[in-house]
Image (cartoon, rainbow, N blue to C red):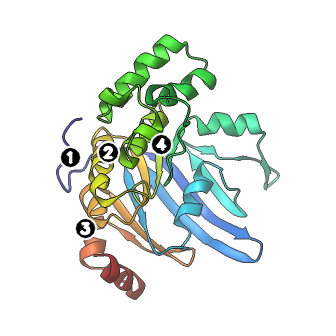
Amino acid sequence: MSAPAPEGTHRIPSGAGELVRIEGVHKYYGQHHVLRGIDMTVRQGEVAVLIGPSGSGKSTLLRCINHLETISAGRIFVDDELIGYREHGGRLHELRVKEIARQRRNIGMVFQRFNLFGHKTAVENVMEAPVQVKGHDRASARKRALELLDRVGLSDRANHYPAQLSGGQQQRVAIARALAMDPELMLFDEPTSALDPELVGDVLNVMKDLAASGMTMIVVTHEIGFAREVGDTLTFMDGGVVVESGNPRDVIANPQHERTKGFLSKVL
């Protein structure tokens, strides 16, 4: 793996445009108002970090970006394409399953739990989607999968089954699996929260390497050190709203809102 970018290094290409645009997004579960008018943009090559207490809406927002959750109001665009819907006469109509699947090909997602196929080896897990979804031949898919496993430091575990891997190794396989679809955007939903503390660093190093390579990333995490070192923006959410957003080092060192100060005082 290549060395991570130094703290504060600006990796975003000059003149990079918006890759993700979130406009007035609301989400209800029955009477429960989970997202309350979220506006956010993420530029090409940017690492956007979301923090906040449990139940603040961070993970729900992430799942809305690749339409694992429907939205109740608003719009989400990735690369100027409306996600999950077509708009006609000012109204949104949900896309067909096949069209949604096409959009998701460009958006990789890594969850808290690894969700690997237990009966497949690491390399088979990574090559599964390119073969089944993109129709790649197995030889080329395997070659690419082995390259990705090497990238996440697991070339020596290619033929191991998930049960033979540690939690951190399984999560790195999950990252390689997401990268196998060549996404333009990577979403991480608390990728280290289910790991033993001594395994967290290996996963974060892979994510730092991705950031240094210019991958656009939206990361929900409680790893404040990662946010400070790697993030280009840090957004604090609470109660389904964006409370504060800005340069991570500025927000962490000098939060402007009492809710942000209270949260950071508990996690730093």
State how far apart marks 2 and 3 are (Cα).
17 Å
Please state if 62 lies on the left or on the right of 34 as rendered: left
Question: Residue 235 placed where, x, y %?
Answer: 42, 67
User: Which label's residue is closer to the chain start, 3 or 4?
Assistant: 4
Tag 4: amino acid: Leu
The image shows residue 206, relative to residue 198, as above or below, that is above
The residue carrying pointer 4 sits among few (fewer than 14), some (14 to 19) or many (20 or more) residues within 10 Å by Cα, namely many
Circle 1 residue: 5
The span from disc 3 to disc 4 (Cα, nearest Å) is 23 Å
Q: Picture coordinates of residue 81 (x, y %)? A: 61, 42
The residue tagged 2 is 211
* 54 on left or right of 147: right
Q: Are marks 2 and 1 in contact (CB under 8 Å)?
A: yes
Q: CA distance from mark 4 to mark 2?
A: 11 Å
Which residue appears at 58% of the width and 34% of the height? Answer: 105
Q: Nearer the viewer, residue 156 or 5?
A: 156
196 or 179, nearer to the observer: 196
Q: Is residue 157 above or below residue 111?
A: above
Q: Nearer the viewer, residue 207 or 245?
A: 207
Q: Which of pointers 4 and 2 lies earlier in the amino acid sequence?
A: 4
> What crowding class fits label 1: few (fewer than 14 Cα within 10 Å), some (14-19), or many (20 or more)?
some
Q: Amino acid at mark 2?
A: Ala
Q: Earlier in the sequence, mark 4 or mark 1?
A: 1
Q: Return the mark for residue 185.
A: 4
Question: Pointer 3: what residue?
Answer: 249
